[in-house]
Structure formats: C-alpha cells, structure tokens
C-alpha cells in the first residue's frame, strides 16, 4: 500500500516509458529497466533527479531506494542535484585539447559567467563538469548540447548555439 | 573422469579439493592462511579488495584466491615472492586513504586491517598527498559510522542484500569517490532497520561500522570473553559477553553452525544495556506499613517464607518467565509442590489452555534448527516470524531462496524478505479458519477425522489455491507446519492446534512450535506447567494455568522474573489494598513501579547474564552456561535464592552444590529425546472457547517488548521497531 503511494510522483507518460523498458527484460527482472526509467524521469523533470523521484522509481520497480541511488550516483549522465534545463559539455580530452578545447571551455565559462559544474542563475544552462572523450575526435573541438553533437566549434559558433537555447 | 575430487598442490603440499571450489576455501580448510578483506564465507564472492592475491604456476599474473576456481593439477603458492609482493602492494594501496587513527578506533586491537598491516604493510608510507575524508552518516541507534576508514570491501552491502534480504546499504558514487551509504547523500540520515543489522558491525573488517552503544567505552584487550546462550528467543543462539570490571560492555555472536551460524539478532546483541537500567535492584526490598525498605537477605527470605507458608493452605500460585533457566524452573516447581500447589505456569501469554491435556508435553520445533533451511515445504500459522525469532526467519529465508514453498496463515501480512508461495490473511479473530479450510481440502471426499465436523463447518469452501497448498505439503519430501507465537496466544489455540495436527497427519508434514522466551521447552521439561510435572509426566490434579492465575489471583503469589502488566496476556496482576490478606513475592532484577505497587517482598535476582544455568532450545538441545558478569549489589542467582527459600520453608533435598547438579537431577527424570507432536491422536476440544473478540496488538508482542531486560535496552528502544512497540504513554517508565 505504501509502495503505491511512493510512485505518485511518476506521470502517466513516464510510467508508460518505464513499462516499455520493463517489457524488454524477462519477467521478474524489472530491475534491469532502472537506467531507462531514470532517463525518462530525468528528462521529464527538466534535467535532474530528486530523492523523491528516485524513491518513486524504486517503488515502481520493486527495488529498495538505495539500489536506485547506487545507479543514479554511478552514472555521470544522471544529475541528482538541481541543474539548468540545458546540459552543455565541452570536451577537453586529448584531440579536443590539441585543437583548442581548453580555450573553448574557458570561453564558454566566460560567456555564461559560470564555472564547470555550475548552472546559470536563470536556470537555463548547466555546464557539466569536465567531460571525457565523447568520440568525436575528427571534429575537434566539440561541444555536446542536450545529447546533440556540435563539431569544429569556434567561440563565435559557441555563442550562437548557447544564445539560441531557450 | 572423477568430478568430485581432484588433487592440487598448495605450497608444495598435495591436498584434495573439489573442482570449481574457490581456492580460498581449500586453503582455509587446510589451515593455510591467505589474507583477505572482502571475502566472507557466508557472503557471495566480490573479489574487490584484491588482498588474497596468490601465485598459480603457469599463470602470468597473481590471482585472487577467493575468485579462482580449483582446477585439477593446479600448483598454488601463497607465500612465494610474487604472492607476497602482490599482497604488500595491495596493502599499501588500501592504506593510502585509511586514516592512522587506530588509537581512537573501537576496532583497534581486533581489526583485520590492523592485523594485516602488521604483517604486510610497510613501515613508512610513500603516499604524501592528502587523504580522502568521508562524511559520516547517521544509520540509526545501533551502528556507528566512521566512513573515512572504509576500504570498500562491500561486505556490509552484500550482508544486507544476501542475508538480511533487503538491501539497505549501497555504494554511492564510483571510483575513488565511492561511499557506503543508506541514502544518496551522507547528510541524509536513513536508519538501517533490519532486525539483524547489528551483524554489519561484525562483517566490517575495519572500524568503519561499529557498535554505537559500545562506542568508546572499552578497548578490546581490556575485556574478558565469556560464552553464553542468548536468552530472548527459543533458538538459544551462542553469544559471547565481553566483560570489563564485572560489567557487560558488549555482546558478539559465537559461531555455532547448527544454531546461529555466525550471526546474532539485534535483540540478543544489544539487550545487555538493560542490565544497568535505573530501576535495577541492588538489595532485597520489604514492604512495611505501605513503605519499602531495603533489608538484608535473611530478613527478606524470612518474610517471604513466612508469608508463603501462611497462605500455603489458602491457595498459592507461581508465574514464571519463559526465559527462566531450567534450574530455576525445576526448583520453583519443587518448591510449589512442597507448599502443596500445582498452580505454576510459564505460558504467560497463553489465553487458551482447553486442549492442554492433549497437547504434546513439549512445545518444540520437531527438528534441529539447521534442518529448517533444508525443508522444501513449510506452512507457518500465526507468526510474525522475523520479529519472533529473527534467526529462525533467516533459516526459513534460506529455504525459500533455495526454492522451498513457504506459506503463511496470519492475522496480518507481516513483511518478509523472501519469496512466499502463499499468504492467507484474515481478521485476528478468525484468520485460522484458513487452516480448517486446508483440512477440508486435505480430507477431500474421504471421511473427515472423527469429531471434526463442528470445527470444519465454520470453514469456507476450499478453493484451488487451498488444494494446491495441500498438494505441495503432501508432495514435499521434507514438509513441516509451524505454529507461531501469535497462534499460541490466540483464544482459539486449542482449535488451531488440533487443526494443524490433523493437517500434518493428513499430509505427512511434521508439526512444530515456535515457542516464546528462551526456555519454554526446558520449563515444560522441568514441570513448570499446571498439568505436567518434571519430565512431562501428567499431574494427577492439574493446578491453575497462567491466565487463570492472573485472572483471579490466589491469596499467595510468587512472581519469577516477570512484570505482569507487560508479560501476561490475561491481566496485570492483583490490585492491592491495605489488609487484603494477599501476599506477593516477586523475584525480579528490577523494581518496576508495577511490582512496587503489587508485591510485599522483592528479591533481587540475577539475569541470565549473571547466573549459571541451562536453556533448552526449540530443537531440544540442552545448553548450559556459566555466569558472564556479576549481578549488581546484593543481587543473587535465582537458583541460589530458591535453594535458600526452600530451606527456610523446611523443604528437604534442596542442598544442591551447583546448578549442574540440579540439571542432572532433572535430566534423570526426562526420557531421551523429545516427543513427536503427532505421537497420539488429538480430538477437538468439547469445551466452548471464551467468547469475545481479539485485536492484533494483543496477539503480536513487539520484538523489543518481549521481556523485562529488552524493554530496558535503550538503544533497541530507539530503533524503528522499538519506537513502534513502545506503549503510547511514558515509554521510559517501562
């Protein structure tokens, strides 16, 4: 009874998406859907997860809360603290570094007025902490905005992309 | 090819092993020590500490002994240059972030990391960078955290997952940021609530998880270790009391594979705090003109003897704690016999004794404790199993995980952390009718057992799932039915018992009882029953049972180790008024308010921590133990008090030199082995049950309210279970 109350924060759409993931795994292995579930919940919640939402996912998938906390805290793609709506990552790994990734990052920081790991005060943009290689070395330096890759980014192009974000 | 055995070589010595067995099991079995942190014989293999690296010939890298399966002809070296180098390097790596705070760490002196650092660590650390610091988390009143000391072996996480059955701890974060936590943020306090969670303290190989009540109160090497048998449930778990200056500082489990394995329940581990409660008595008390006065033993005993003697002709009864020792029980019933009364009982929470003459004389499990996990079908009737006997629930869990079909018939859906094949819940008044339905299903079209018609008429028609359950019990090669404490406290217990016995007989299952207290089996053997004397022999004239005694107390009453208001189902003891002609002697470790209001003499007795004695566990195993600590002040072991009291009353043959002599005298009166619960046919009782309705809270006694000692254990009372079980007002006064 308590378990069903705990799932209350999950919307009908999110439940549908979680059910779609659950259906991919054998019966009784609904735990395996946790990553898909967290993606759906994070997306709907504007880019981050709350303890309440994590507990809701746990109740929905019949896991203990700490089992969901483990997954959410392990993967860098899940944010467990409030962050800006748009997630921006600038690659500074070797290829991008050689092609000016560090300068690009410094430019982005200056342009937005925040450091990596911070969000803009208006809650618009979250500059994700230092990102490892995103496998776009041929287009270095690169920047990822909400899972979309932008390659051969110049400071001017970066301004354009960032300013266009709602 | 023989798949069962193969020969491998360990450090040049040929030994036999099973292919597929992990190397560390083989080395352990042959007393070859391999250092380890994450490996624990009762938990799954994680192989994440890497401390157990050893060399295997023709393998280019050192291998972890805990995760390397045996293969025929393997040549293993545990002390070679390469193995030692690997172990040293791992140790250096583990010590990088481990604080050098052993002098203020409770684990110091009994720490696996400290010991191994002595053997494998370098004298000087090469790591000059800053060490990692982890914020501690509040995990509740039992387990303290110093997470900076954690080496991430994950034994604790695996314990909650694999033994407790509910993962309350996890690894939050990853890589060098990983922390052990019960929540996503260390700042969020999330208590660890499982009734076995104290074992986290033991599985932790470092000082990261420690005992909160014991914290900073002694050093390991200052204490003496005394073996004891735990006195709160019918398992008789083996424990050690660690004692300093005559005081119990903490309790840890003593490994006993057949009973408690390597575990202890929280109730057994933390109840010792109750020994030093504020209302613990340190001298005999005598009521004079309505006022209490501390008196000497001779004065108190003379008053007690005179009062009892005077009322011997008018009616005398004794109520005995189900956790009294065998010796205490035997002397009490001898004493009562001397005073001419058969009204003596330890079944304090029993409401229904209509069928007692036909019940098996001894309420035992019907099998060894370890056999429970080998059952393939088990039906449990009327039991909040996890809270009644936590480590029996663990055995049942092992059976369930191994595929056994576990069924419950209960007045509520008590949560368990294992797969359950069927749960039948009903109202507290008539949940047991499901058992009658099962008997109908088992009898089928055949003739109903004689005289059962009336009882079965009330039962609902069997459904498909009833027939399935009966079929499972029938098909099981090792099937059992257990009657729990809720069943035994039920006002219709006589009917439940007959139905369970009938179902067991019809399906071929065995019948067992999950009894209350530590020594219900022993006290039944000792004759602490109104209808059976020592050795279970029926008494010619049965006396009054506990519910009759407490319902209408006779003029003379002897209370032993109990507080009637909390320990008796039928009432809270006689209300007293001046000149009412009553006389109440209480042998008690505590001078609780209710006893002070009720008694005329209070004799301070030792708890089971402080007396020599014997408990007989639910499997019928006689387990004797010696006193681990001294009772405070003038407190004396109960059997010695009774010995002198009997002498004062002019009884002969009470000059036992020690408790062992009492136990062996009783042993001589008992037949070998315990009776089968189904040995003789049982008929439904003719007598009508007591009318009225019963509530769940009357049937289910909270885990930390079960006896006077545990009610005073402060840390246990602060747990979720403790707070849930506290009476609405003034929990402290209990």
Image (spheres, coloured by chain):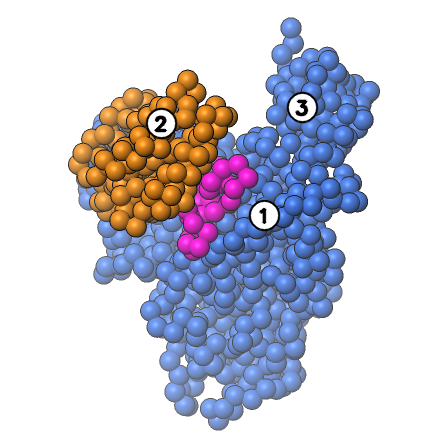
Estimate the x, y position of residue B585 in percent, counting from the top left: 51, 77
Reading the image, the residue beneath label 3 is: B63
Q: Looking at the rendering, in which quadrant would you find the C terminus of chain A?
A: top left
Estimate the x, y position of residue B697 in percent, counting from the top left: 31, 59
- For the residues marked 3 and 1, what is the alpha-carbon distance in whole angstroms? 28 Å
Under circle 1, the secondary element is loop
- For the residues marked 1 and 2, what is the alpha-carbon distance in whole angstroms? 37 Å
Label 3 resides on the chain identified as: B
Q: Which residues are magenta?
A: B162-191
Residue B147 in the magenta stretch? The answer is no
Q: Is residue B254 left or right of residue B184?
A: right
Q: Is residue B542 above or below residue A136?
A: below
What is chain B's hue in the picture? blue
**Residue at coordinates 41% horizontally, 33% vertically from top-left?**
A104
What is chain A's hue in the picture? orange
Circle nearer the viewer, 1 or 2: 2
Q: Are marks 3 and 1 on the same chain?
A: yes
The numbered dot on residue A128 is: none
**Residue contact between numbered discs 3 and 1, judged by CB atoms under 8 Å:** no
Q: Is B80 in front, or is B184?
A: B184
**Residue at coordinates 61% horizontally, 18% vertically from top-left?**
B20
Estimate the x, y position of residue B609 in percent, counting from the top left: 62, 62
Reading the image, the residue beneath label 2 is: A153
Estimate the x, y position of residue A67 in percent, counting from the top left: 41, 39
Label 2 resides on the chain identified as: A
Q: Is residue B346 above or below residue B731?
A: above
**Residue at coordinates 59% horizontally, 32% vertically from top-left?**
B48
């Amino acid at each position: 009874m308590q378990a069903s109350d705990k799932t209350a924060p999950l919307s009908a759409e999110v439940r549908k998406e979680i059910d779609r993931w659950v259906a991919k795994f054998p019966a009784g292995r609904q735990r395996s859907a946790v990553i898909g579930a967290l993606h759906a919940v994070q997306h709907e919640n504007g880019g981050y997860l709350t303890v309440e939402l994590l507990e809701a996912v746990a109740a929905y998938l019949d896991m203990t809360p700490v089992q969901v906390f483990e997954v959410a805290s392990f993967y860098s793609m899940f944010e467990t603290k409030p962050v800006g709506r748009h997630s921006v990552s600038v690659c500074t790994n070797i290829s991008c570094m050689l092609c000016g990734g560090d300068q690009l990052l410094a430019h982005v920081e200056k342009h937005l007025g925040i450091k990596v790991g911070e969000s803009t005060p208006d809650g618009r943009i979250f500059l994700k902490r230092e990102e490892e290689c995103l496998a776009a070395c041929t287009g270095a330096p690169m920047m990822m905005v909400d899972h979309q890759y932008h390659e051969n980014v110049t400071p001017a192009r970066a301004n354009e992309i960032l300013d266009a974000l709602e | 090819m023989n798949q069962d055995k193969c020969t491998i070589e360990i450090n040049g010595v040929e030994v036999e092993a099973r292919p597929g067995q992990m190397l560390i099991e083989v080395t352990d079995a042959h007393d070859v020590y391999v250092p380890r942190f994450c490996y624990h014989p009762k938990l799954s293999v994680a192989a994440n500490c890497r401390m157990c690296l050893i060399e295997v010939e023709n393998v280019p890298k050192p291998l972890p002994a805990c995760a390397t399966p045996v293969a025929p002809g393997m040549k293993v070296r545990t002390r070679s240059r390469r193995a030692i180098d690997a172990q040293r390097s791992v140790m250096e790596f583990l010590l990088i972030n481990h604080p050098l705070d052993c002098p203020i760490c409770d684990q110091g002196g009994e720490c696996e990391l400290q010991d191994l650092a002595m053997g494998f660590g370098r004298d000087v650390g090469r790591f000059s960078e800053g060490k990692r610091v982890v914020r501690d988390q509040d995990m509740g009143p039992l387990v303290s955290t110093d997470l900076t000391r954690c080496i991430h072996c994950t034994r604790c996480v695996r314990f909650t997952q694999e033994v407790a059955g509910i993962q309350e701890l996890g690894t939050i974060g990853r890589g060098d940021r990983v922390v052990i936590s019960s929540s996503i943020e260390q700042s969020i306090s999330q208590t660890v609530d499982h009734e076995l969670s104290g074992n986290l303290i033991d599985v932790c190989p470092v000082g990261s998880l420690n005992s909160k009540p014991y914290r900073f109160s002694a050093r390991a090497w200052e204490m003496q270790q005394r073996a004891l048998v735990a006195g709160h449930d019918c398992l008789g778990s083996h424990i050690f009391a660690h004692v300093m200056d005559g005081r119990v500082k903490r309790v840890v489990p003593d490994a006993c594979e057949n009973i408690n394995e390597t575990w202890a329940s929280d109730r057994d581990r933390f109840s010792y705090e109750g020994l030093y409660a504020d209302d613990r008595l340190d001298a005999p008390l005598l009521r004079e003109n309505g006022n209490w006065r501390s008196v000497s033993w001779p004065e108190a005993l003379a008053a007690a003897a005179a009062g009892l003697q005077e009322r011997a002709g008018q009616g005398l009864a004794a109520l005995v704690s189900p956790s009294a020792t065998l010796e205490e029980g035997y002397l009490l019933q001898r004493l009562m016999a001397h005073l001419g009364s058969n009204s003596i009982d330890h079944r304090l929470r029993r409401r229904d004794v209509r069928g007692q003459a036909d019940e098996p004389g001894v309420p035992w499990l019907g099998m060894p404790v370890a056999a429970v996990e080998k059952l393939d079908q088990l039906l449990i009737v009327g039991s909040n199993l996890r809270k009644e006997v936590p480590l029996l629930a663990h055995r049942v869990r092992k059976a369930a995980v191994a595929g056994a079909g576990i069924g419950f018939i209960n007045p509520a859906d008590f949560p368990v952390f294992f797969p359950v094949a069927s749960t039948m819940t009903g109202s507290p008044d008539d949940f047991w009718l499901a058992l009658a339905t099962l008997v109908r299903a088992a009898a089928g079209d055949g003739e109903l057992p004689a005289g059962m018609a009336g009882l079965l008429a009330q039962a609902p028609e069997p459904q498909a799932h009833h027939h399935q359950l009966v079929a499972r019990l029938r098909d099981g090669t090792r099937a059992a039915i257990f009657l729990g404490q809720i069943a035994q406290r039920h006002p219709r217990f006589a009917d439940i018992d007959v139905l369970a016995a009938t179902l067991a007989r019809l399906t071929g299952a065995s019948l067992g009882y999950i009894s209350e207290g530590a020594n219900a089996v022993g006290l039944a053997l000792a004759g602490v029953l109104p209808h059976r004397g020592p050795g279970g022999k029926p008494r010619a004239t049965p006396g009054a049972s506990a519910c009759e005694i407490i319902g209408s107390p006779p003029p003379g009453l002897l209370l032993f180790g109990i507080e009637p208001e909390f320990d008796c189902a039928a009432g809270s003891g006689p209300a007293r008024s001046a000149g009412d002609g009553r006389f109440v002697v209480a042998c008690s470790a505590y001078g609780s308010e209710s006893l002070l209001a009720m008694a005329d003499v209070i004799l301070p007795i030792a708890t089971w921590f402080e007396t020599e004695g014997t408990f007989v566990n639910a499997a019928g195993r006689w387990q004797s133990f010696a006193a681990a600590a001294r009772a405070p002040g003038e407190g004396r072991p109960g059997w010695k008090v009774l010995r002198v009291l009997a002498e004062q009353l002019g009884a002969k043959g009470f000059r036992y030199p020690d408790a062992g002599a009492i136990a062996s005298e009783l042993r001589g009166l008992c037949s070998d082995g315990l009776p089968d619960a189904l040995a003789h046919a049982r008929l439904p009782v003719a007598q009508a049950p007591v009318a009225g309705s019963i509530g769940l809270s009357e049937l289910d006694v909270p885990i930390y309210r079960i006896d006077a000692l545990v009610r005073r254990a402060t840390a246990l009372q602060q747990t979720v279970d403790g707070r849930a079980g506290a009476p609405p007002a003034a929990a402290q006064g209990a």
